[in-house]
Image (cartoon, rainbow, N blue to C red):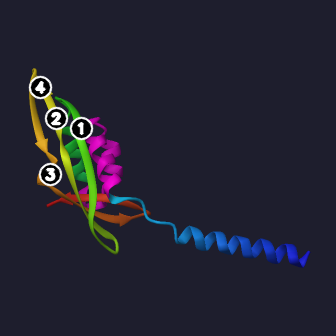
Amino acid sequence: MYKTILTTSMLLGISILLAACAPKSDPAQSVIDYLTALTAQNADSAVSLSCADWEEQAHLEADSFLSVDAVLNNVQCKTGIINDDQADVTCSGSIDMTYNEEVRSIDLSLRTYSLKYQAGEWRVCGYK
């Protein structure tokens, strides 16, 4: 009985240590998820992918796509600098918006996204 309890306790302890060492999610994927939420006009999702200081702006950005058809075009993001709980992400591609048959694009390579690691996830906190 003692060996069973000891073995179970050791396995539980090892599992906890391995979980604590698990890699953090990818900041670049968080930006892609954020951009996807914006183009899908999903303000709730965009806000949930944002840090507290950026939530209001995320809501405004999502609302700005309400009157257009928006799609992500060849978007790829890559994580640049990571310092503890902060990261910078750059993207290529564009957000293409159609309104009255006129297409306008936002060149995503002109922005560097700033992220913070909060509540176990990388969250968008703005751009430079």
Q: Separation of disc 4 and disc 3 at Cα?
A: 23 Å
- Counting from the top left corner in percent of width and height, residue 84 is at 34, 75
Quadrant assignment, res 104: top left
Q: Residue at x 29, y 35 (%)?
A: 40
Task: Quickly name the residue at label 3.
Answer: 109
> In this figure, which residue is indicated by the disc labeled 2?
96
Which is nearer the N-term, disc 2 or disc 3?
Answer: 2
Name the mark on residue 99.
4
Q: Residues within 10 Å of mark 4 (few under 14, many from 20)?
A: few
The answer to whether residue 99 is left or right of residue 66 is left
Viewer-proximal residue, 71 or 37?
71
In the rendered image, residue 82, in percent from the top left (x then y), is placed at 30, 70
How crowded pointer 1 is (Cα within 10 Å; few <14, some 14-19, many 20+) is rated as many
Q: Nearer the viewer, mark 4 or mark 1?
A: 1
From the image, which quarter does the C terminus lie in? bottom left
How far, Cα to Cα, is label 1 from label 3?
13 Å
| Magenta span main SS | helix
What residue does disc 1 label?
72
Whether residue 69 appears in magenta in the rendering, the answer is: no
Query: How busy is the neighbourhood of tag 3: few (under 14 within 10 Å), some, or many (20 plus)?
Result: some
Q: Is residue 39 magenta?
A: yes
